[in-house]
Image: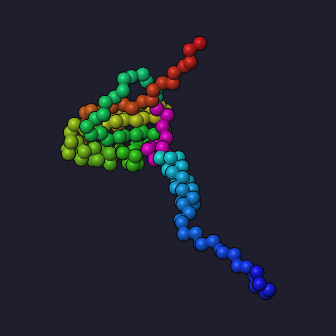
Amino acid sequence: MAFGRLERTRTDAPMSDINVTPLVDVMLVLLVIFILTAPLLTSAIRLDLPKAESAQAGEAPLAVTLVVDGQGQIYLNDKSILLPELATQLKAVASHRPDTEVQLRADQSVPYGRVVEVMGAAQKAGLSRIGFVADAPVAMPAR
């Protein structure tokens, strides 16, 4: 070392790798959001279906879903509809495919007369295959 000269230390080369940790963090957060919201997208109409023991129903080749909620409001394939409009929509479905099955989901608090009105509209339209959807009963623990 000479007088007045300082030693120079070699500096490290700049890092040229991509840091993927923030990308992985963002992707995991999005994955959790999709996992939490996916079950909410299946059916937005909340019903208290009656309980019944039965065998699992087979899938119909083509089916439309009719829902009658607790207030008596009718939904065709998760879209609100009035009874006169329901008849015309079901007639259009029956003219296209007469073997279409109607899957009827009715809240257990709905008066029976309202359910019969909806069934009558389906039968007048020419759809005679009507299936009632119910929840399986909750099993009681053995004592």
Residue 20 image point, x, y percent = 54, 60
Q: Is residue 120 visible?
A: no
- Image height of 137 relative to 35, above or below: above
- Picture residue at 51% right of the left edge, 51% below the top: 31
Give the left or right position of residue 98, taking residue 122 as reference. left
Residue 55 image point, x, y percent = 36, 23
- Picture residue at 21% right of the left edge, 42% below the top: 97
- Picture residue at 54% right of the left edge, 49% below the top: 32
* Most frequent secondary structure within the magenta stretch: loop
The reply to whether the magenta stretch includes residue 44 is: yes
The quadrant where residue 5 appears: bottom right
Which quarter of the figure is the C terminus placed in?
top right
Give the left or right position of residue 12, taking residue 100 as reference. right
- Image height of 82 relative to 26, above or below: above
Front in this rendered view, residue 132 or 136: 136
Front in this rendered view, residue 22 or 17: 17
Which quarter of the figure is the N terminus placed in?
bottom right
**Colour mode of the rendering:** rainbow
Give the left or right position of residue 130, taking residue 20 as reference. left
The reply to whether the magenta stretch includes residue 46 is: yes
Residue 131 image point, x, y percent = 33, 31
Residue 4 image point, x, y percent = 79, 87
The quadrant where residue 63 appears: top left
Q: Is residue 129 visible?
A: yes
Residue lying furthest top: 143
Front in this rendered view, residue 54 or 16: 16
- Picture residue at 59% right of the left edge, 72% below the top: 14
Residue lying furthest right: 3
Front in this rendered view, residue 8 or 89: 8
Range of the magenta residues?
Answer: 39-49
Count the labels in the image.
0
The quadrant where residue 65 appears: top left
